[in-house]
Amino acid sequence: MPRSRCPKCWQEVGEPATGCPACGFNIQEFWNSKDYFDKFILALNHSEPNSQINAACVLGKLKDTRAVGPLINLVKNAPNDNVAKAAVKALGEIGTQEARTFLSTLVYHPAKIIRDEVMAIFAPSPLLNKKKGDSNES
Ligand SMILES: [Zn+2]
């Protein structure tokens, strides 16, 4: 996440900035006080879709269950299907009951790339080579 933007309003602020000229947000204090998890949660609301995708990917890898709610919101409010897909993937990686319940509502999503991602999450991995009836997922 580039530090040349205000983490609150995403204005370009140049660097190193101590306060945002646009909204007055104390940028320096933010970078010093928040942990990286919070920064990535905030980045989910970034104005650039690529940054949102990046943040979703990182949060999926962190597998922190606090990311589930924000990621669900991102799927619902994504600016495009690629962003929604990244959030769906991250939810699949975190894999809490709440995440899986939400993902199960997306199987009839109008976008094919979303449906495909959801199917990939719920389908048993071919790498595991599970036998039929072996699965006790519910
Ligand atoms: Zn600002």
Image (cartoon, rainbow, N blue to C red):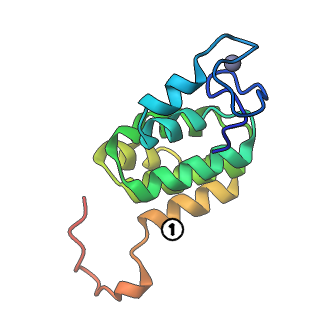
Q: Nearer the viewer, residue 86 or 117?
A: 86
Query: Where in the image, quadrant-wise, is ligand 1 located?
Result: top right
Q: Is residue 108 visible?
A: no
Q: Residue furthest top?
A: 24
The image shows residue 65 at horizontal and vertical percentages of 33, 44
Residue 6 location, quadrant = top right
Quarter of the image containing the C terminus?
bottom left
Residue positioned 75% across, 14% down in the render? 21
- Give how far across and how far down residue 58 sits, in percent: 51, 54
**What residue is shown with label 1?**
120
Q: Report the quarter where the N terminus lies.
A: top right
- Give the quarter of the image for residue 22: top right
The residue depicted at 41 percent of the width and 38 percent of the height is 35
- Determine whether 128 is above or below 94 in the image: below
Residue 33, image x, y percentages: 42, 29
Disc 1 is placed on an element classified as: helix
Relative side of 107 to 130, left or right: right
Q: Is residue 50 left or right of residue 90?
A: right
The quarter of the displayed image where residue 122 is located: bottom left
- Crowd band around label 1 with a 10 angstrom C-alpha radius: few (<14), some (14–19), many (20+): few
Could you tell me which residue is drawn at 50 percent across and 23 percent down? 29
* Camera sees residue 53: yes
Query: Nearest the camera: 125 or 22?
Result: 22
Determine whether 137 is above or below 28 in the image. below
